[in-house]
Amino acid sequence: MDHSTIPDARTVYETLVPIWPDRGSALSYRSCFELLIAVILSAQCTDEQVNKVTPALFEAYPTPEALACASLADVETLVRTTGFYRAKAANIVGAAAIIARERGGAVPDTIEELVKLPGVGRKTANLVVSVCFGKPGIVVDTHVLRTARRLGLAPTDDPGKSERMLGSALPESMWTAFSYALNRHGKYVCRARKPLCPECPLAGLCPSAADFMAS
């Protein structure tokens, strides 16, 4: 990586956000509760697979109250194909129980409260507050982590450090759009295997591009 060519975060923002303006989630949901549960299930699983599972899950358990009282074995069966299904089933039932019994059925609207729920880390919390409540959020998933590292904006494999580095590089008003643009760019262009560097609008500024194009 040529550190002399690390681009300015605002330049990356101004380049990518117009190309990838969508700030929504690829997960299917009808409420903040459904989005929260879907994001917990999406850990180490594709959004597409989660979207195949959640319709039956939410038909059976449409509210926090219903899921809180669910049979764990039944929930495990419904979410089995998302991987790590036992842990995920326990987490979503546990999160639903807290929301139902301690919060009157309302999903928390702050990162600090969300991360207290089972199965909820900062990635999930940032996604929920930005999508559901319109608050600034930096959603560091595997695509954002990889793209920010390759660009030199956040040269780390630690999601927490990446979030802090990206957050310090731009004002809060840019956080949400920036992280979603990095996500889309990482998913479709700066891919894990064989990134499409010749097609990337940042290739001339990216300190990693030359290495990939030479390989």
Image: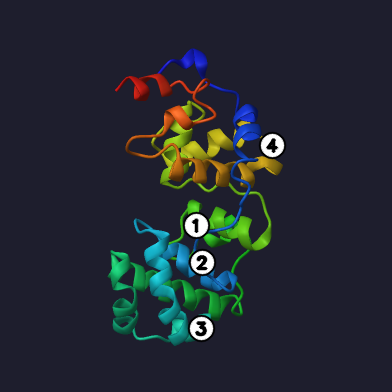
Disc 4 marks which residue? 171
Numbered circle sitting on residue 124: 1
Residue 84, given in percent of the width and then of the height, sits at 28, 64
213 and 65: which one is in front? Answer: 213
Q: Is residue 47 above or below residue 143?
A: below
Could you tell me if residue 3 is visible in this image? yes
Residue 136, given in percent of the width and then of the height, sits at 66, 49
Q: Amino acid at mark 3?
A: Pro
Which residue is at a point 54% across and 80% down the rendered structure image?
Answer: 100
Q: Looking at the image, do the residues carrying marks 3 and 2 touch, with CB atoms under 8 Å apart? A: no
Numbered circle sitting on residue 36: 2
Q: Secondary structure at mark 2?
A: helix
58 and 48: which one is in front? Answer: 48
N-terminal of the two: label 2 or label 1? Answer: 2
Which residue is at a point 35% across and 73% down the rendered structure image?
Answer: 89
Disc 3 marks which residue? 62
